[in-house]
Amino acid sequence: MIKIAFCDDDLCTLNEINGLLDLYRLEHQVEMVSVVFYSPLELLAEIEKGLRPDILFLDIIMPGEDGISVAKEIRQYNEAVKIIFLTTSPEFAVESYTVGAYFYQMKPICTATFFQLLDSVIAECEEAQHCSLVLRRKNGVTRIQLEKLIYCEVIGRTLMFHLENEKVLESVGCMDELCKKLVAYENFVRPHRSFLVNMEYISSISNKTIKMDNQAEIPIPHGRCTQIKNQFLAYASKRKQVLML
């Protein structure tokens, strides 16, 4: 199920997009739900409460707060949402990509190009949903892409997810349960009962530690070094990564 939100102070634009989404849903048989916001304050209030859309259509020029500023605030809660800016002027095009905009949609909206945009962004969302993990956190839920997870460690009853953007997200959970959920993904290895490592980010392996690309060092229990090295070499070979022997 794809979750879409759109925010615009122009009622005509909102009605137009809503109609296009309904038409797209019928023609393409896509399961999606949508929610409308008439002001950025309404949108931000719901984001703070835990709203996590997959796609956000956001007007740039709105009273009170412009779309770029709103997007910056949203990124504090949700880095995965595909933000598509709506505007009648191209002057903010460059700045829009500083907040990780997916696309910059000019008004008036052309049905054919809008549907092409939906084809692209929905395909990416569906792929991300199959290769992502939803974390339950104190301030709501957060979806992370597994390819951006460097490693996870457990401290007490808290899972610490270390991401490639240097962020660390906390979630209540059990390492055993996490490993069961990720068993289908061959790029993860559990070298220690308290750590789960993404082999894509391994820099080197010694007798006692795994060194990650972010300089983190993961301990290797006595007697497990050979097994972990072999698992990593097998993975690297399957990925056709160059091995220097």
Image (cartoon, helix red, strand yellow):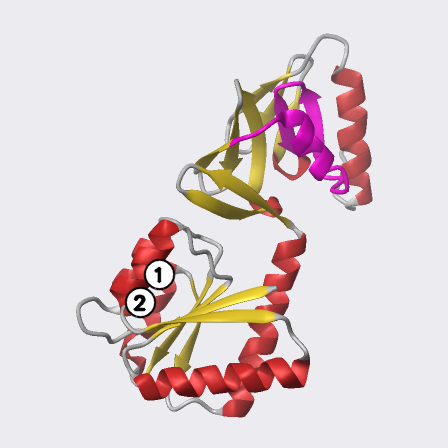
Image height of 182 relative to 211, above or below:
below
Inspect the image, locate mark 2, and give the three-letter code of the amino acid beneath it: Glu
Residue 98 is marked as 1
In the image, what residue occupies the spot 46% across and 38% down? 137
In the image, what residue occupies the spot 70% across and 35% down? 188
Inspect the image, locate mark 1, and give the three-letter code of the amino acid beneath it: Thr
State the image coordinates of residue 223 (x, y, percent, origin top left).
77, 9
Image height of 97 relative to 176, above or below:
below
Q: Which residue is mark 2?
A: 95
In the image, what residue occupies the spot 44% across and 52% down? 79
Instruction: Evaluate whether residue 245 shows in this view.
Output: no
Instruction: Evaluate whether residue 198 shows in this view.
Output: yes
Q: In the picture, residue 129 is in which quadrant?
A: bottom right
- Mark 1 residue element: helix
Q: Are marks 1 and 2 in contact (CB under 8 Å)?
A: yes
Please state the extent of the stretch shown in magenta in the rendering.
172-198
State the image coordinates of residue 67 (x, y, percent, origin top left).
29, 68
In the shown orientation, is residue 229 left or right of residue 49? right
Q: Is 215 in front, or is 117? A: 117
